[in-house]
Amino acid sequence: MNKDDDVESPLLAAAGDHDDPSSSAAAGSSFALACALVASLTSIIYGYNRGVMSGAQKFVQGDLGVTDAEIEVLIGATSIYSLVGSLAAGWACDRAGRRRTIALSAAMFFAGSAATAAANGYAALMLGQLVAGVACGFGLVVAPVYIAEIAPPSSRGFLASIPEIAGNSGILLSYIADFALAGLPMSLNWRLMIGIGAVPPLLLAAAALLAMPETPRWLVLHGHHDDARLVLVRTTGGDAALAERRLQEIVSSVKESAKQREARPGGCGSTSVWRDILVRPTPAVRRVLLAILGLQFFQQASGVAALVLYAPRVFNHVGVTSEHAVLGATILLGVTKTVSIVVPLFLADSLGRRPMLLSSAGGMAVSLLVLGFSLRVSSSPSPGDDDAWWAAAMSVAAAAAFMATFSLGFGPVIWMYGSEILPLRLRAQGTGIGTAANRVMSAAVGMTFISLYEAVGMAGTFYLFAACSAAAWVFVYACLPETKGRSLEEMEALFDTAQPSLPAP
């Protein structure tokens, strides 16, 4: 049996033996929770990098003479760069392992933030955002994959929600930093806003290399069964019998996947992963891929990136002109988004994935309709003072309601759902494909938002986003089975047999 000497970690060694079953379960959950929290640092850093430009862009423009069009390209290009990162992350996860890929993403986050903060021109800004964008793609892929594979089935929904909470916390922290540093000289404030993001990656890289175990499923896939057993013992709180049973389930799943692969044209190898996903997928894999791509498309088509990246412009449009008032309203969005994201943490394993996604999509559509209406009132030829006041208040409230309903389902649940339904051998690459689709749509929204609202109006733009959210509700209802409480090894059978228009039993 092969042995990976650096798989064992202080986190793994720190968990002791437990004789009482309830104590064992608690210890296993605590160990998995500690691993998930460390992995989710990636998402905090991603969220900070994603949100900081919302407030910093005005000061970047003033200091470096960057135009609106260049800002639009800069922000949208970051999503294109993260597309490259998400595709490369799947390959890195499979080759180097999940935790080494986390360390690699942390190193890139550090380099990208530092380079952007030190930029003295538009080209340097683009270079810094290139590195940071690739790091974002890595972070979006590796954290959900790691947590899905380390978590016990009973708490996978809870643990898989943590990265989205962490990402929203990162966005909120970036808004707070923007607000706190806005009063400094223009040549300094935006550099500090962005440069702060270079500090947490150093902590993440150290934690990933020194404190995190590799996931048992990756270890089995690469022949390290003894190391996988050690990790499983810890995630079950010392229950050796349960750990052995789960190990055998994973081994059987890997062997069955290998048999199917060998029986199909092309044999094995890294290229067959792409063949199994894109060229000759089984009916179950095809349905899984449809679910993942559809969810990722609709998440960004709802326009969430427009509010995350351009909230100050939206509030300016509705008549909120004070710089502190605009940044304060933006912080309100961040607080609402972050607080609301806690709800799925406790409901995903009890209520289920489908009800949360359906409620989220419906709430998003209604909120966006109200936001569009308030923006139309504020842009009427001669609004009165009373109209202007309540339209501004309604716009802020509707934007906050959108963030809240987005965070109830389409924020965290799509990442949880996508990472758990893919077969083991295809999980990292498949998650990368889904994330790439997400980044394409995010880039499309980020790079066209200013041009779009100039063409069809700010209100018309949010009406389009509302229509996409309504279409998302239809997609979830028609195409997604329920997955709560099922082991990862059961998912392919679920998508083979379940009627996609009905929840799975």
Image (tube, rainbow, N blue to C red):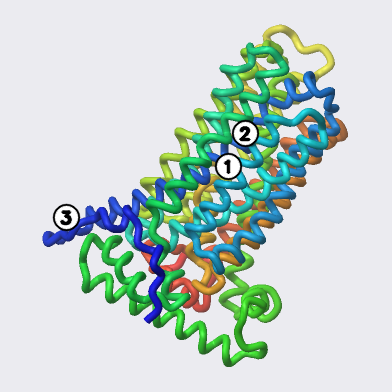
The image position of residue 57, as x and y in percent, is 73, 26
Q: Secondary structure at mark 1?
A: helix
User: Number of numbered discs present?
Assistant: 3
Q: Residues within 10 Å of mark 2 (few under 14, many from 20)?
A: many
Q: Earlier in the sequence, mark 1 or mark 3?
A: 3
Circle 2 is placed at which residue position? 51
Q: Quadrant of residue 362?
A: top right
Image quarter hosting the N terminus: bottom left
Q: Quadrant of residue 303?
A: top right
**In the displayed structure image, the side of residue 61 where residue 245 appears, left or right:** left
Q: Residues within 10 Å of mark 1 (few under 14, many from 20)?
A: many
Residue 426 in sight: yes
Residue 46 disc label: 1
Image quarter hosting the C terminus: bottom left
Amino acid at dot 3: Ser
Q: Residues within 10 Å of mark 3 (few under 14, many from 20)?
A: some
**In the displayed structure image, the side of residue 382 where residue 134 appears, left or right:** left
> Alpha-carbon distance for marks 3 and 2?
40 Å
> Alpha-carbon distance for marks 2 and 1?
9 Å
Q: Secondary structure at mark 2?
A: helix
460 shown above or below 292: above
Q: Quadrant of residue 397?
A: top right
Residue 23 disc label: 3
Residue 180 disc label: none
> Alpha-carbon distance for marks 1 and 3?
35 Å
The image position of residue 359, as x and y in percent, is 51, 46
**Near-viewer residue (145 or 286):** 145
The image position of residue 191, as x and y in percent, is 67, 25
